Amino acid sequence: MSHIRTALMATATLSLLPGLGLAQDMAPEKTAVLATYADIAEATYGDSLSSAQVLDAAIDALITNPSATALEAAKAAWLAARVPYQQSEAFRFGNAIVDDWEGKVNAWPLDEGLIDYVDGSYGGATDENEYAVLNVIANPAFQLSGEEVDASAITPDLLENTLQEADGVESNVATGYHAIEFLLWGQDLNGTDHGAGARPWTDFASGEDCTGGNCDRRGEYLSAASDLLISDLDWMTAQWAEGGEARETLMADPDAGIIAMLTGMGSLSYGEQAGERMKLGLLLNDPEEEHDCFSDNTYNSHFYDGLGVRNVYTGRYVGIDGNVTEGPSLSDLVAAADPEVDAALTADLDATMVKLTELKVAAEAGFSYDMMLERGNAAGEALIMGAVEGLVTQTRSIERAVAALELDEIGFEGSDSLDNPDAVFQ
């Protein structure tokens, strides 16, 4: 799927007079920039699909022949699958087809008691969600919204069309990466101490070796969720291929397409990542606000989200097989309009990646993201806020790029944690 796209226009280095940009006739066509963007989307979703298929094979092996080794292999495959998918999040916010679909594959946080058993400290049903501890795996029949549901067979259709956002509650997440994550790791009961979920492999064993009860149905659920993830990713990959709806919509109006690119970059950088995924958890000192909270993989999710934003701007994506997809870029377009704006935005994107790398290195050395969120942990707060500040700064540069391209002003996604922190505690 990944490939090197032949540049459509020369991008040779020019000797420029101070303050002057590239000659306008050297600027890439907007359609060429959009084609690179669509190619990168196709490659990124294609890699997400390929890695999900590897995960599915590992899940099949775990269910067929449960063991500690098989469970660890499935966990490793899940972690690898997150690498390309998180880079795809830069295609959200500006592309309606992605926004309408994304909740099926990456919704969070979730009330995990909907799916399986939980620790007693989890509590029970709440006013916000009466199905917070439904435990579908333990109940082959149950009442939902006043109707009897036959869950004797746990199928992709049951997960997608009955359980996902059941009763209109967003935290009833029954599908996607995080449902699979919970089934592989179990709850993380360590609070702000080091450690991820510790589900035993015997939760998938048969007969007397089964722990947690209903091991066969747990395997059914895991298999159904994996099958559904593959079909969803296969569908989205096709939307970005030649003739696909996402690509055709993007290319139909070049100015709107460029706005979609910048909208995705700015909204993911600011409201979603800096705000909802990072600053909010720090304000609340709550590890439940981690994006990959069961596996303690949140630091990687943040890193690859940031990389995905930079991929869009630079018009370059390195695939899981090492192949490169690249071509005329948004950076080229901005440089032709205002080289100083392009230089500043490029530098800001690089600076953010440095901060995200620092956070990633610290987490991989044992200073887990849970620990960083602990109230009063100055070192953890500094690491997280360094990345937050980098993301906010690059968003301001993205706004300047919008102005340099003389596009209509874009309203990026916001977050109370950034714009009105007092509201977080109300």
Image (cartoon, grey):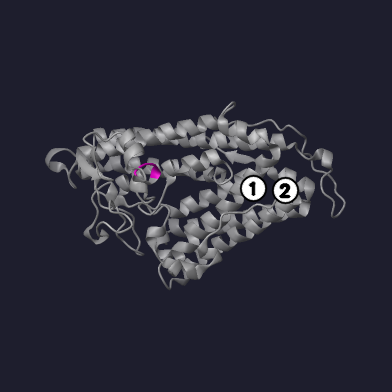
Q: Tell me the residue at 63%/38% (across/down).
A: 37
**Does 113 lie within the magenta span?**
no
Indicate which disc, 1 or 2, sits on the residue closer to the N terminus: 1
Question: Where in the figure is residue 426, as x and y percent of width and height?
Answer: 43, 69
Q: Name the residue under label 1.
A: 262
Residue 270, quarter of picture: bottom right
What's the magenta region?
A: 173-177
Question: Where in the figure is residue 414, as x and y percent of width and height?
Answer: 55, 58
* Picture disc at residue 283: none
Mark 1 surroundings: few (<14), some (14-19) or many (≥20) residues within 10 A: many
* Picture disc at residue 407: 2
Residue farthest toward the front in the current orientation of the protein:
146
Residue 246, quarter of picture: top right
234 up-or-down from 296: above or below = above
Q: Tell me the residue at 47%/42% (across/down).
A: 102
351 up-or-down from 229: above or below = below
What SS does tag 1 mark?
helix
Question: Where in the figure is residue 79, as x and y percent of width and height?
Answer: 41, 45
Query: Is 32 on the left-hand or right-hand side of 282?
Result: right
Residue 84 visible in the snapshot: no
Residue farthest toward the top in the current orientation of the protein:
243
205 up-or-down from 377: above or below = above
Q: Distance between the residues labelled 1 and 2?
A: 10 Å
Q: Tell me the residue at 24%/61% (across/down).
A: 121
